[in-house]
Each structure stands twice: as structure tokens, then as C-alpha cells.
Amino acid sequence: SPAPVGMNFGLVGYVYGTGNVFFDKSLPVEDATGVLHSVTLAYVRTLSVFGATGKLAAVLPVAWGDYEGLWLGEPASASRRGVADPVVNLAVNFIGAPASTLQEMATYHESTVVGAAILVKMPFGQYDSGKLINLGANRWAFRGRLGGSQKLGRWNFELMGELWAFARNPDAFGGNTIDQDPILAIHTNAVYQFRRGFWGAVGYGYGEGGQTEVSGERKDTRQINRRFGATLVFPLSPRNSLKVSYLNSLSARIGADFDQLAVAWQYRWGGGL
């Protein structure tokens, strides 16, 4: 959604997840389940990108979790604590959202907005090739996203398509290399604005792809995932807001099958506020 240029957002969030909650979705682990906790620190700044509204975000997750599963048919368990791979994301709304000051936003009327984003996940998280399960993936990952929204009264209807691409993990467990095919996904959301800053949303997503190759051997790991999500954002003051979200895997073949609950506090400053 559009915001005044020069505004800053600081966010601290906590996420609780159960199920197949690995940070690395290419692991050759069978029947794996776990409980994962993470605390996320994030910073976002709004920009003018050739006259359009842009947002630059940096995210650092710190996580701890316990896992159980099968490795080569034998029961195995693991516990991990540390920093996961950080993320940088640049998004630009190039149609329907001109870069504006806070004063200009007062007369802005949202209608159709189209934007794109590029996300980079960097391999700087905790990783040990002698361990099968890690918080870091030891590879670069990239996500390109194109989406649009249409405002109708208090409602916003959104549709987004995205493509994940992955570099090779050259030093995986057991002296292997891991390559993974791209994952193509589509999302749709319905957002309802109760009042300024107070909104709720429900969404559905479908993703497919991501088959892995371990040291040149193709595996039967093609993913087909369907997910449902819900979000509620409540303003505590002009600068502070609270966000609660839930994500559920309706069905999954091979891929991440989990339930996830997140709570985040956001503080904003600058941009003429």
C-alpha cells in the first residue's frame, strides 16, 4: 500500500510454527516435524523511484527450534539456535501510486495499483555442513514478484504472481551438492479497511515446483502447496501498530506443511509524520 516518501518503519515480530518448518525447503528429510520459534527484526524505508512509490526493506530473523524425522529410514532429532538467513527486498508501485509527501497523501485516492518487487535471501545464517538441519541454507535465493490491487469502497482485492530461484548449495550434508528448480506461486487477497490504519485480510496461495537434485541425482521432491492466511492490523497510536497473522498449509506434497502464528509490533517515524 502507498505511504509517504521518507517514512521509516521499525518492526519486531515473534513467530511460532509447527510442522515441517525448515528454513531450507530443499532438505531430503522424510516425515519431519518440528516446533520453530523466531524473532524478526525489520526496517523499511519508503523511497521515490523515478517518481513512483518504492519501499526498501531489510529483515534479520533469529530462531530456535526442535525437530524430529527420518534420515535414510532411521529416526533422528535435532535442536538449533541462532541467526537465519537475512533478507533484503525492494518493491516499486509503478502504476497508481506516485511518490508523494504526507501532505499530498491527504488528497490521494487509491484505485488501481500495480507493482513489482525483488527479494534476495543471503546465505549468512548459521550453517554447518556436518549437520543435516541448519537455520541457514548456504545458498543465495531470489524472488521476483508482480502484483496488482483494486480498491472498491472499503475493500482491496489483490492478485500477485511470484517466482523463486535458487543458487546451488555446494557444501551440503554428507559432502553433497544440492540444486533446486524454481518455484512458481500465485496469491490472492481480500483486504477490508475498518478505518485508517485498522484493517483485516484473508488470502489464498498456490505454489508448484522446487524439485531437487542431490549430487546430480534427481529426487521425487516436486512441491505442490496450497496455503491460507489471515491478518489483522490494529493501530495503537499514530506511530504504533500491532499485527497478528496466521498461515496454514491446506495441503502440501513434499513441501512445507505447517501452521504458523505471528505477532508483530511496528513503529513508524519520518516522512513528515
Image: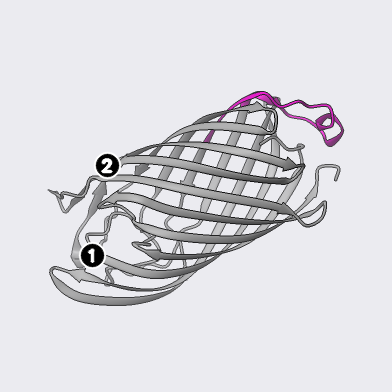
55 lies above or below 68: above
Residue 249 disc label: none
- The residue that label 2 is drawn on is 181
- Element type where label 2 sits in the image: loop
Q: CA distance from mark 2 to mark 1?
A: 22 Å
38 lies above or below 66: above
Task: Please state the total of marks drawn on the protein image.
Answer: 2
Residue at the image point whose x is 71% and y is 53% from the top: 234
- The residue that label 1 is drawn on is 31
238 lies above or below 107: below
Nearest the eye: 34 or 60? 34
Structural crowding at the residue carrying mark 2, measured as other residues with C-alpha within 10 Å and reported as few (<14), some (14–19) or many (≥20) = some
Q: Quadrant of residue 109?
A: top right
Residue 178 placed where, x, y %?
A: 24, 53
* Disc 1 residue type (three-letter): Asp
Q: Quadrant of the C terminus?
A: top right
**Mark sitting earlier along the chain (2/1):** 1
Residue 88 placed where, x, y %?
A: 54, 48
| Chain part drawn in magenta | 94-117
For this view, does 162 lie left or right of residue 41?
left
